[in-house]
Amino acid sequence: MSGHWPAGWRDGLPELFARDWDIVVVGGGITGAGILLEASRRGLKALLVEQRDFAWGTSSRSSKLVHGGLRYLKEGRFGMTRESVRERQHLLRDAAGLVEPQGFAFGDYAGRKPGRRLFLLGLAIYDLMAGQRARHYYKGEDFTMLAPNVAREGLSGGMCYNDAKTDDARLVLRVLQEAQRHGGVAVNYMAVQSLLRAGGKVCGAQLLDAVSGAGHTVRARVVISATGAWADGLRGQLGAAPRLRPLRGSHLVLPAWRLPLAQAVSLMHPHDGRPVFAFPWEGVTLVGTTDVDHGADLALEAAITRAELDYLMAALHRQFPQLGLVEADVIATYAGVRPVIDSGQADPSKEGREHALWLEDGLLTVAGGKLTTFRVSALDALKRVAPLLPGWRADLRPRPIFEAPPALSGTRLSSQQKIRLLGRHGRHAQPLLNAAGRGEHDTIAGTETLWAQLRWAARGEAVQRLEDLLLRRTRIGLQLRGGGIDIMPRIRAICQPELDWGDVRWDAEQAAYLALWRRHYSLPAPTPLAEA
């Protein structure tokens, strides 16, 4: 597919599934995408299927941070931190414009833990792992120049350090497109109904197409489950006991003008001492995150609760008291479920974030892990299944994540916009600009997204639902009030012809999207006590 999903691509699915496959990857988040890329670029015939949309689950609802895990140092997890820091540096190099540096500021308040000396020691180790050095401590006035809106009472200065951020859903799409360029195949809205077994070993899957309703059978030498928080469902078909602890992390999105930040601000929550952050992202400001057990049905979309909203607002009120932030300032919310390995910790925040591999009756499950270390998880998975692929030999040392795309020509975009577009779309950036209609090189107000990106996504990025377009291919649904309802007429004018949807289909998709947004991406309803 050359990294693109052309018009009518789903028509060829029966023939595609009838092929002989080396690997079938189940799960279209960042872990599954990484496995597809690393397998296909090493000559394996690899297929990925996702029951919903690509990045639908955790990989579009993360905290958007590509970080080394500074907080893991105090827990003694030096190996995990070192690995994460190195992967962060590789992503900053290979995915410039998609993974971007982000400075963090942490206020030095009287009595706040961790104290200055311990924090600075951690930062020195952090720098050593990354092979860099930077100034970390700033006294009072110097620190408030970097973070001008923070609370002043008890502030003696602050620590600053560097990490990185990304558009998590676009990172997944870029990895999938790179995998398809190497011969891999990725299909969304294709659910695994049951695993196929021969001689007691998993050898394929029975699939159900959520778009057409058709059933398919696919066979492979190896099946890898990269379904994140949903992994125990597939393992349960083999009689395996649950091993995951789904944890929910919820976030707030505010206008950049209402919570203006040059640096990310990291703070400890006044109630329980957990880390909370606020940072500039894609033209808005993100605030997060919570860390609570998610007891809801995993088949349902996660959403922030009233208790989580109150928790995050309390952190904002403590850290930015002079801004007078209120719930009405929140543009959108979102919540994701993390696939954490259950070790029995009473406090969800103390559960480890390392990935794990379980090979059971021929099914390899890859669980846990972090966005930052997706390549490490993918290579570990291939090392584990290599004995199940007789005749396949490959160098499994890390390779550059992306190849450098060609420079853009014939555009008046700023240098920063060009870097951003190349980071998100790679070699498709130039065709995207060439396909733009009049005025579509302009930025959508309130975002950093070009109108042309909407057209391109609708044309060739496997959009099956309007929510795919507005919540994952672009992030308009998080960046604009009401999920972008005010600009829906222009979105329709650009995208309806590209999607080849009639008026009845568009109206139904728009109604479904707006209903979804109100249920899962807006503010939760007030409690009865709050209404009284």
Image (cartoon, rainbow, N blue to C red):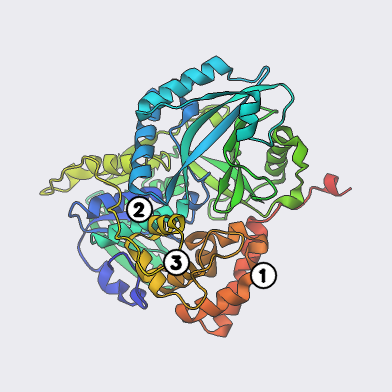
Q: Is residue 28 visible?
A: no
Point out the tag, 1 or 2, that comes first from the N-terminus.
Answer: 2
Point out the tag, 3 or 2, that comes first from the N-terminus.
Answer: 2
Q: Given this view, does label 1 or label 2 mark the residue nearer the observer?
A: 1
**Separation (CA) of disc 3 from disc 1:** 27 Å
Discs 1, 2 touching: Cβ within 8 Å: no
Q: Is residue 170 left or right of residue 159?
A: left
Residue found farthest to the left: 391
To which residue does mark 3 refer? 412
**Separation (CA) of disc 1 from disc 2:** 34 Å
Q: Is residue 72 above or below residue 362?
A: above
- Label 3 sits on what residue type? Arg
To which residue does mark 2 refer? 33
Give the residue at x 44% y 74%: 436
Q: Secondary structure at mark 3?
A: loop
To which residue does mark 1 refer? 486
**Separation (CA) of disc 3 from disc 2:** 33 Å
Residue 277: x, y in percent? 60, 37
- Label 1 sits on what residue type? Asp
Q: Given this view, does label 3 or label 2 mark the residue nearer the observer?
A: 3
Give the residue at x 50% y 46%: 64
